Amino acid sequence: MKTLKLLTAAMAIPFVIASAQVRLASTERAADSAKKDSTKDTTTVVTVFSVVKPIVIQHLRPNDQRGLNMFEAPKSDAVPYTGFKFDIGAGFTQQFQGLQHENTAAPVMVAGVNTTSLLKIGNGFNNATANLYLNAQVAPGIRVAMTSYLSARHHQESWVKDGYALIDASPIDIAALNTLMKYVTVKFGHFEINYGDEHFRRSDNGSTMYNPFVGNLITDAFTTEIGGELYVRAKGFLAMGSMTGGEVKGQVTAPEKRSPTYIGKLGYDRQLSQDLRVRLTGSMYKNDQAASNTLFTGDRAGSRYYDVVENVSGTSTAWSGELRPSFPNRVTAFQVNPFVKYQGLELFGVIETAKGKASTDAAFRNWRQLAGEAVYRFWGDKLYAGYRYNTAEGQINSAIKNDVNGNRWQVAGGWYVNPMMLLKAEYMNQKYYGFPTTDIRNGAFVKGFMVEAALGF
């Protein structure tokens, strides 16, 4: 019932916008009619309607098309401070899935069930997903934010994703501090960590406006942790240092099992000319001890591909199709991300290596991931077409001694009906290699199409 209400609300938005456009057209026709009759007062008032929500919060990445190719929340801002402001935003996504899967695993019978037999799937709608965004401007350059998953694959009930404060101006009017804060940003609370640049382009539950594709990467580096970030930005250069608790959940028990996580990012992002923008960043994530680290397992929303390569028993996980290296107790990871935008062409890459272990592992295990995508936007950025290739490999856990591999290619296209409404379609093909014959992923592949409709405001 909750999902139905969300979907109904989402479907109503285009009709509200259309109604506004009709009222505008009617007003303009009335003005033309008045001009033709010289005996009437030709003074008319034409009301102009906007199909995008005004931005009233400072240093905010919009949830609609205006947020494309933004990474960190913008330091420069044209929004004036006029006192306290409160803003509500949302993201809605509905999918139609047409995927198929097969494997070559040998039968493994447990309690009369073949645990390597695949669940039968077909074409159909997935449950709608939704995000709620709350932002408050509490002082010049200072805002607080909270994101909630109203409906997610992993948590269909309402679930708070994060809440934090972002400070881009000094709360004390001292000249030295005001000058310093022209270059410095401070963020603290429970937030989406800034490791790598892919997390700025991925789909995040109901928020799918920034992702030109439907699926995220095979190995999805995304989590929320509690701590703080310090940024210094000047003339295109970026430096960020962060310290967090190292886990998705705050804990004070068993301190001997936990240590802080240290995250760093260095980069350069500059619009070199009207047509050319370049960005290059490198990120590091290091945790030496955790009871349950979730760098590669922290997505509470779940995979965008439902029930693929899952067991016939129907007890599927929320992260179907992903390869999630098991590094719950120690992990060190690096990610490099080049980005080039020339006119309508966008090129983006992911080069990632990670080393980690579980407490029961005798030695560290290694994991590697590469991804490259090309997207071309045209017709005033209303349409786009894109291609992505992604491969991930390494020793996924201590039970499988050899390296395993997964690769996927995706072809996608999309249409921004207006800046708040996106319709996109994707064809994907994913294969698995190196898994034992007793593993459900042995010789497995997934292929087919996805159609996704998104709203963001």
Image (tube, rainbow, N blue to C red):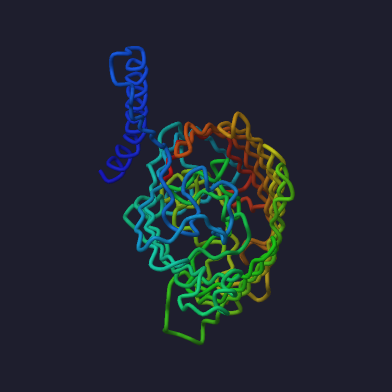
Percent x, y of residue 325: 60, 61
Q: Is residue 63 left or right of residue 340?
A: left
Residue extending farthest front? 39
Reply above or below: 434 against 335. above
Q: Exactly how many numbered labels are in the figure?
A: 0
Quarter holding residue 445:
top right
Q: Nearer the viewer, residue 319 or 139?
A: 139
Percent x, y of residue 252: 42, 83
Q: Nearer the viewer, residue 223 or 105?
A: 223
Q: Nearer the viewer, residue 178 or 420?
A: 178
Can residue 109 be seen here? The reply is no
Q: Quadrant of the N terminus?
A: top left
Residue at left offset 45%, top offset 34%: 96
Residue at left offset 58%, top offset 39%: 446
Reply above or below: 213 against 136. above
Q: Nearer the viewer, residue 457 or 312?
A: 457
Residue extending farthest bottom? 256
Quarter holding residue 264:
bottom right
Quarter holding residue 18:
top left
Q: Is residue 322 left or right of residue 136?
A: right
Q: Quadrant of the C terminus?
A: top left
Percent x, y of residue 20: 34, 31
Percent x, y of residue 138: 38, 67
Can residue 24 be seen here? The reply is yes
Q: Is residue 27 left or right of residue 362?
A: left
